[in-house]
Amino acid sequence: MEKELIKKIKNKKLKIGILGLGYVGLPLAELFLKKNFSVIGFDISSKKIKNFKKGIFEIEDIDSDFLYEKIKENKFILTNDYLKLRYADAIFICVPTPVTKERVPDLSYVINASETVRKVLRKGHVIILKSTTFPETTEDIVLKILEGKKLKVGRDFYLGYVPERVNPGDKKFTIEKIPVVLSGVTEKCKKIIKEIYKEIVSYVHTVSSPKVAEMTKLYENIFRNVNIALANQMALLCDKMGINFWEVIEAAKTKPFGFMAFYPGPGVGGHCIPVDPYYLSFKAKEYDIEIDFITLAAKVNDEMPYYVVDRVFHILIKEKIFPMDAKILVMGVSFKKDISDIRNSPAIKIIKLLKQKVKKIEYIDPFVPEIEDLKMKSLKYKKEILKNFDLILLLTDHSAFPYEEIMKNSKIIFDTRGVFKKKNKKIYRLGGGEIDF
C-alpha cells in the first residue's frame, strides 16, 4: 500500500481532497492543481461552492482565471457532499480554529471535520491536519476519532500534521516558496506526507512528532504577538513622554545584529496571531503552567483598540470638537495592508466602539466593499469628501491610498500606522509623542 501511494504521488495520480475552502484550503488547492494533481474541494457553505463554480473567488493571492479553468476541465471538483471525499487519496483538513468570547479554544470545526473524514475513511487514506491548534490535537483528538473506525494508523491509513504558513498579500513568499514543517503519527505516515509535499514546495523540514509541528506553529505566531505587544507598550510610553517612537525604531534598525523591527498599531488581527496565545495558555494549564508572559502580551494587543478610541476622544476634545457631534472617516478596515481579510481586525472593534459615541462614522477600503456585521459599505475615495469629516482615522495603511492628497485635504488625521513621517500640527500619531495634556 505504501509503495502504491508513493508511485501515485510521483506520477501525479494521487487525488487530493481538501476539506474547507477558505484562506488556507483554497490556495492549497490551487497549488496542487498547478502541480498537475486533481483536487476535490469540499466546503459546508453552499453559497461559497456556487460562487466558485461561477468563477467568483473572494480571496487574494489566487489566480481566479486558472481555478475557473480547472473547474471547467473537471480537474477541480467542488462539492457540498462529503461522501465525494471518499474518492480522494489524501484529505487535508483546513478548517477554522477560533476562540470563544471567553478566550477558550473552539475545536468544534476540527472535531466535526474529523468525524466527517471518519465516515469516508478507507484503507490507504492519507489524512493531514493543517488547522492551527495546540499540541497533541492530532494524536489525542483527530486520531482517536479516526481510529474509531477500527483502522490502524500507520498500517491502514496515514495521519500527520502540517501547519499552514500563509502570509496574505505577500508577493515574495508565496505558498509554494515557503518552507514546510511536517510530521506524522508514525514514521510511515511522515514518509508519505513528506513525499506529497516534496511535489509541491521547494523545501520540507520534518520534525519528530505532530506535537512538535503543532508547537512550532504556535511559537512562530506567538513570537510575533509578543514583539508587537512590546512595540505597542513602548508606543504608549513614548506618547506620554513626548518621544516619537517611530523615530526610535528607525534608529534601532541601524543595529546590524540582535534587533528585529516590530511596529505598533491599533491591535493585531487575522486568524492566528490574536488567537494562538490563548490556545497555548489553555493547553499549558493541563500541565500546571501559567504562561503569564505570553498571555500578558496578548492582553496588551487586545487592549489597543480601546486605547485608539480613547486617543480619538482626546484629540477631538483638544481640537474643541464635541465627540457626539464628530464625524469620523476610517481609512482601511482589513487587518493588514493590501488585503481584504477582516478576520479579527482591530478596525472592526474600533468602529463598533465609536459608532454609538460619535455623530457619524464611515469608512473607505478599496479591498472591503462591505462589512456585513456592521451593515456598512465603503465610500468611494474622492479627495473632496475628506473635508466633510472632522477626523480621518487611519487604521490600515493600504498602498492605494494617496497619502499626500489625504494630508492636504483633511482637517485632522490620527495615524495609527506611522505613515505620515513629517511633523504637522494637523497630524496625530500612535506612538508619535504628541500627547500634551
Image (cartoon, grey):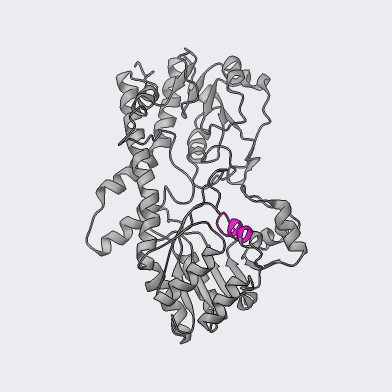
Magenta region: which residues? 22-31
Q: Where residue 234 sits: x, y (%)?
A: 32, 30
Q: Is residue 287 magenta?
A: no
The residue shown at (51%, 32%) is 395
Kindly indicate the quadrant of the structure image that contains residue 235.
Answer: top left
Q: Where residue 408 sits: x, y (%)?
A: 59, 14
- Give the left or right position of residue 289, taking residue 277 as reference: left
- Give the left or right position of residue 161, taking residue 330 as reference: left
Q: Nearer the viewer, residue 74 or 243?
A: 74
On screen, residue 236 above or below 170? above
On screen, residue 434 above or below 118? above
On screen, residue 291 above or below 250? below
Q: Residue at the far bottom: name it.
A: 150
Q: Where residue 106 sits: x, y (%)?
A: 43, 61
The residue shown at (57%, 67%) is 19
Tell me, yes or no, if residue 178 can be seen here: yes
How many numbered circles does the render carry?
Answer: 0
| Magenta stretch: dominant secondary structure | helix
Instruction: Pick the quarter of the image with the C terminus.
Output: top left
Kindly indicate the quadrant of the structure image that contains residue 371.
Answer: top right
The residue shown at (68%, 59%) is 47
Q: Nearer the viewer, residue 387 or 121?
A: 121
The residue shown at (52%, 78%) is 118
Kindly indicate the quadrant of the structure image that contains residue 67.
Answer: bottom right
Q: Residue at the far left: name it.
A: 288
Tell me, yes or no, if residue 103 can be seen here: no
Q: Where residue 180 sits: x, y (%)?
A: 47, 58
- Give the left or right position of residue 33, taking residue 234 as reference: right
